[in-house]
Image (cartoon, rainbow, N blue to C red):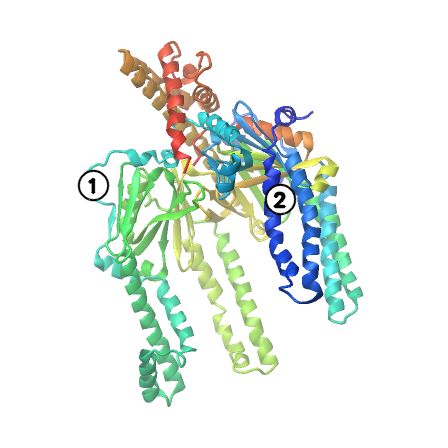
Amino acid sequence: MTLLDDDVQADLAPAEPQAPDERLDPRVELLWQVNAALGWIVWISLAAVALFVFDRSPAWASLMAPVAATYVMQVPTRRYRHFVFRVGPADVRVAHGWLWRTESVVLHSRIQHVDTRQGPVERMMGLATVVIFTAGSVGAMVAIPGLATARAEALRDELVRLSGTDDAV
Amino acid sequence: MPSEAAVALDEGGRRLHPLTLGFSAITIARQMVWPALVGGFGLGDGQIARMLPIFAAALAVPALIGATLTYTLYRWRLTGDELLLRSGVLSRRNRVIPLARVQNVEVRQNVLHRVLGVAELRVETAGAGTEAEAVLSVLGLAEAQAARVRLLAHRRASAPAAVDGEAADTVERPAAPPLARLSTGDVLRAGATANEAGVIAAALAGLLQFADDLPLPFFEQVGDAVMGRAAESWLAFGIGLVILFLVLGWLISIAGAVVRYHGFTLAVEGGEMRKRYGLLTVHEASVPLERVQAIRVEESLPRRLLGLASLSIETAGGTPGQRGGAEAFVPIARRAEVGRLVRGIFGDADADTPLQPVHPAARRRLAFGYLVRLLIVWAPFWVARWLDVQPAGMLAPWMALLLPLPWLAAGWAYRARGWALPPGYVMARSGVLTRVTWIVPDRKLQTLHLRATPFQRRRGLATVVVDTAAGGRQAAIIDLGEPTARRLLHELTARIRAATQLRAAERIAREAEEAVARADAEQAVPMDAVSAAEGDAEPALASGSSSSVEVDVEAAVAMDPPSPVDVDLPAVAVDASSPVQAEGAQAGSAAGSVTAGPASTG
C-alpha cells in the first residue's frame, strides 16, 4: 500500500524478513461513517438553530445535506483504504491519511506503555483502538483504530512484550 | 480469544479501596456546595436561585451513580512484570505499563488520606504528558506501600541518575573553565540584537495611546518637544515618534539583557551543565547532560548579519511534573564558536557539517504558498477600492510592486533549509527571518514520521519529522524528495537501533564490571572476568541481536532478591560460569531498590 511500499528497505536490509502489512477491521468504515454522520447532524442542527435565531428559514440548513452525504460516503472509505500498519522485527509502522499522509515509525525499544481504548459505539461494534506511547513530545502517541477487540488486545500484549528496556530518554 | 492482560485483570484484578467512593462523593458535594448555598440561604433572588439546590441534587445523583460505576468497573493488577489498569464506564481504557519502564513511584497522602489510612499511588514512566501514567486513587496505605516496593524493585539499578537525584552526590571537583562565559560586551550585544527590541517599541507605541492619562513627566516633555518643532508636519511627527520608540525599545532591551544575563556562565563538568547568570536575581541551576535531547542554534536576522547566534539546549522533564524544554541556553555566541559549544555538550557532534539542500521543487512550492498569502492580503484592498474606501483603495494597484516578493522570499526560505547526517546526529535547518538549526542525537530519537500534504505530493515532496522527549518542539526536515525522505527514515531507524544496542551493550559491560568489583571486595576474584565481559559485549552489538541481550539483562536485574539463583544474565554478553556475577547482579538489584526508595517520597 501507498507509503509502506518501502523499496529502500528491501535494498538496505535484505536479510530482514518483511512482516505483512495489516489492514484495519473492515467494520471500521461503518464506525467512521456513523461518527461522521453524527457529527454532521450536530453541525446541520446548529446551522438550523442559527438561521432560526436570525429570522431565516431553517430549511436553508438542508443545503449542507449533499455535502454531508458525500463526506459520509467518501471520506471514511478512503481513510480505511489508506490505513495500513505493520509490526516488524524492530519497529511498528503506521501509515494513514488520504489527502494528508503520515507514516510513523516507532521502534519497539522506544515504547513506554500501550493502551487499548473503546468508545461506546466501538464497544457495540466489538472494535477497539490501540494507542502506543513513547517518551516523545508532540508525536508521542501513535494510534491504530478500528481493530477487532481480540486483535487489539493481542496487538497490545505483543507490543508490550516487544517493548525494549532501553533507558529511552 | 481474550488476551493475557485481559485474563489477568479478570481473574486477579483488584479494586481500589472502598473509600474511593467516599472521596468521589466529597468531590461531587464540593461542586454542589455553591449552588446549594446560594439558593438555600436565599442569597440570590427569585425562582432560579431557589431552584438551584434542586438542580444541584439533580446533577449530583447521576454523578454519584457514575462514580459508583467507575469504582465498580475499575481494576488494577501488578503481575510479574506489568502494571495493568482498566478504567472507564462508557469509554473503556486498558493500560499496560511494563515495570521496566517505571521511572517514579509516589505514595501521596493529604490530611484526610492520613486520617483515614489511605493513599494515592502515582506511577510515572518517561512517557509524554505531565500527568502520571497511572494514578490509583485511593488505596489502603499498606497496599499502596507494598505496591510501591514491588514497582521500585523492578526499576533497573542503572536507571537514569537524573530521576534519583543521585548525581548530586558526586564529589565536587575543582571548577573547570566554563564552556561559555559572557563579558559585559557580549551581554550588551545580546540585548542590542534581541528580537524583543521591536516588540518593546510596539508596546511603547501602544502606550502612547494613553500618554495623556499617564502622569509621566517624561512622556509629556518628549511630547511637547516633538510637537513644538514638528507639529506642522504630521508625517515628520509620525516618523520621529517611530524612531524615538525604536530607540527607546532598543535601549530597554539592552538594559533588560544586562539585568538578566549579567555574568552568564555555562559550565559542563561531572556529567552536568551548570548555568549561572543574573544581575539582581542570580539564577543558578544544574541539569544532567543525560537529559539533553537536542540543541537549537537560533540566528535572528540582525544576529546573522553580525555573525552571531544563540543556543537553546532542549531537555526532557526529569522529575515528575517538570516539563523540560529549553532548560539551558547560551544567550549569545559568535557563529564561529557554535561548533565548539555544541561539542562541549555533545562530545562527538560535528555541528559544522555542511548541510545539504532540500529538493529544488521546494522553492516553487514555497513561492506558490507565499503568493497565495499575498493575494489573501491583497484582496481586501481591491474590495476597498471597489467600495471607494480611501486610502486603502488608492494603495491597491501599487501593491502590484510586492508581486516579486513571494519569489524572493521563497529563495531565502529555500536557501535556509538544509539537513545533514553527521555521525551520530541529525541536523535540520529552516527559517526565513530567524534561522533555526536543530542538532539531535540519534540516541534521543523517539518516533519518526514521514508526512506529505496534498501540495507536497503533487511535487513528489515529503517532510521527515524527528521527535525527541524535548518538551513541545519538534525538528523537521521539510520538502525532501520523497525517495530521499524514505531513505532518511530508513537510515534513522537503523541508527536508533544501533544506538539502542550500543547502550544495551554498555549497560551489560557496566553491570558486569560492577558485579565483579562488588564480588572482588568480598573475595579475590581474577580480573579477567571483567575483560571477558567487555570483550564479549562488542560482538553482541555487532551481531545485531540486541533484543535477546536486553531480555537477559532485564530478567537478571528485575529479579526479586529471594528467588533462586539461576540467573542467566551473562548468557549473551558475559560468561555465565561464575556464580559470583549472578550474585553481584542480585546485589545490584537490591541496591537499586534501596537507593530508589527515598527519592520518590518527596
Categorize mark 1 by other alpha carbons within 10 Å: few (<14), some (14-19), many (20+).
Answer: few
Mark 1 highlights which residue?
B175
Three-letter code for the amino acid on which mark 1 is drawn: Ala
Task: Residue at 64% x, 27% y: name it.
Answer: B6
Question: Hey, which residue is sitting farthest left in the picture?
Answer: B174
Give me the C-alpha separation between circle 2 and circle 1: 57 Å
**Of residues A4 and A152, which is closer to you in this image?**
A152
In the displayed structure image, the side of residue B60 where residue B527 appears, left or right? left
**Of residues B465 and A166, which is closer to you in this image?**
A166
- A142 versus B409 height, above or below: above
Q: Nearer the viewer, mark 2 or mark 1?
A: 2
Residue B25 numbered mark, or none: 2
**Of residues B427 and B234, which is closer to you in this image?**
B234
Three-letter code for the amino acid on which mark 2 is drawn: Ala
Task: Residue at 75% x, 55% y: name it.
Answer: A41
Which quarter of the rendered picture does the N terminus of chain B lie within?
A: top right
x then y, percent, for residue B318: 41, 40
